[in-house]
């Protein structure tokens, strides 16, 4: 993603990613899923990816993903919610989903 405004197709891709993450957490309950989704996005997404979603209208996000993005934007990182994000920070590593 460039420093320019993201194209519609880029936003659609980010919405799809966020929605897929949220769907993986549905089984743990709505409120926990929101925090786990926010944790995953904060822990693994490149800052440019997050900024693109923050600055969008977020209309393509499912409810859990939309609440997770709003949480990050308004309140910041909710802290580690899963073993995956705990693991990603071991040894000072902080990995990104960006390729």
Image (tube, helix red, strand yellow):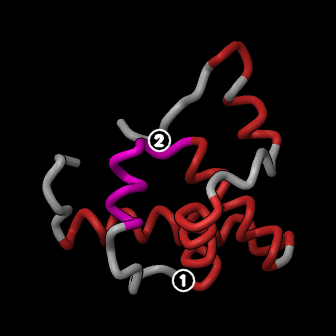
Which label belongs to residue 97?
2
Q: Position of residue 2 (x, y in %)?
A: 17, 47
Q: Is residue 55 left or right of residue 15?
A: left
Looking at this view, is 84 or 69 the one in front? Answer: 69
Q: Is residue 96 left or right of residue 71?
A: left
Of all residues, the one furthest to the right in this rendering is 28
Q: Quadrant of residue 60?
A: bottom left
Q: Residue 68's image quarter? A: bottom right
Given the current orientation, which residue lies at the most extreme front position?
74
Disc sitting over residue 72 in the figure: none
Q: What element carries label 2?
A: loop
Asked if the stretch drawn in magenta spans residue 68, the answer is no
Residue at the image position 73 percent from the left and 55 percent from the top: 78
Give the residue at mark 1: 62
User: Which range is magenta?
Assistant: 44-54
Point out residue 87 in the picture as x, y percentages from the top left corner: 75, 29
């Amino acid at each position: 993603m460039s420093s320019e405004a993201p194209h519609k197709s880029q936003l659609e891709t980010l919405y799809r990613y966020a929605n897929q993450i949220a769907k993986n957490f549905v089984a743990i309950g709505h409120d926990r899923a929101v925090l786990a989704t926010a944790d995953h996005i904060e822990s693994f997404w490149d800052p440019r990816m997050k900024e693109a979603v923050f600055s969008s209208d977020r209309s393509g996000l499912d409810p859990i993903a939309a609440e997770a993005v709003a949480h990050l934007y308004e309140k910041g990182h909710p802290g580690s919610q899963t073993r995956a994000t705990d693991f990603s920070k071991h040894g000072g590593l902080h990995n990104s989903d960006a390729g």
